[in-house]
Image: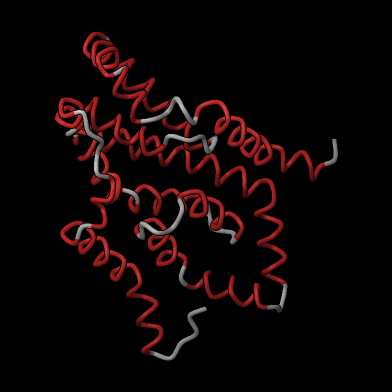
Amino acid sequence: MPERLKRALPLILIVVAAVTGYALFRDQLTFEALSENRETLIAYRDAHYLPAVLVFIAAYTAIVGLSLPGATIATLTGGFLFGLFPGVAYNVIAASMGATIIFSAARLGAGERLAARMDIGAGRMARLKKGLDRNQWSVLFLMRLAPVVPFFVANVLPAFMGVPTWRFVVTTVIGIIPGGMVYTSVGSGLGTVFEAGTTPDLSVIFDPWILSPIVGLCALAALPMLIRVFRKEPVA
């Protein structure tokens, strides 16, 4: 097997798993499936709490790491089964590990070579990378905090830009906590939703009382870039 193909194999497998998973599980990892199986899940959690936690984290990690459908449902399930605390901790741990799997696969497959080429290049992409290198912390936090950035993009793009793994992990863990708390909180209230026969309102993250603090965190993350602008230093 050619070396280039061998290095790209993990990312190829994730793409294949994502396509296969969407075809096989898009109708199973749903809110309706959670509602139908909620009593079984609760019974298993009450009888085997630690195994339930480990199975949940492993399943959530696989969903994110293989880009399977159902990440939002998994977050809601974490809140439903384990409450806001420690549910949010389990959700953040699993989502972060899954994100790191995608990041590592992308970096191994093409990220390292692409980043090296941009470092020695002189084109527009090279200038963009140099600008991002000066503002890595800010950009990484913004991608995690802003609810408009797709999670998969926020996992792959840093790999192509040569972001160190430890920096990716730190910003991922910290950056997904606000959104994770919101959706875990929604999940913790699913008992009432199930009894009413309705569906949860996932647009709650865009409510002003929730979105405003997140916007404030985004502004804080962008502050180093704003300072560079005021000092007339190059940003990107």
Q: Residue at 33% across / 67% down in the picture? A: 221
Q: Position of residue 13 (x, y in %)?
A: 66, 34
Q: Residue at 31% across / 66% down in the picture? A: 218
Residue 128 versus residue 5 in the image, above or below: below
The residue positioned farthest toward the front in the image shown: 197
Query: Which of the 4 image quarters holds residue 77?
Result: top left
Q: Could you say which is closer to the camera, residue 75 or residue 88?
A: 75
Q: Residue at 51% across / 34% down in the picture? A: 68
> Left or right: where does residue 20 sit relative to residue 113?
left
The residue positioned farthest toward the right in the image shown: 2
Query: What is the count of numbered marks?
Result: 0
Type of colouring: secondary structure
Q: Could you say which is closer to the camera, residue 162 or residue 11?
A: 11
Q: Position of residue 198 (x, y in %)?
A: 22, 33
Q: Could you say which is closer to the camera, residue 201 or residue 218?
A: 201
Residue 6 versus residue 59 in the image, above or below: below
Q: Could you say which is closer to the camera, residue 32 or residue 16?
A: 32
Residue 99 versus residue 58 in the image, above or below: below
Q: Residue at 29% across / 12% down in the picture? A: 40
Q: Quadrant of the N terminus?
A: top right
Q: Position of residue 184 (x, y in %)?
A: 25, 39
The residue positioned farthest toward the top in the image shown: 47
> Left or right: where does residue 113 sit relative to residue 128?
right
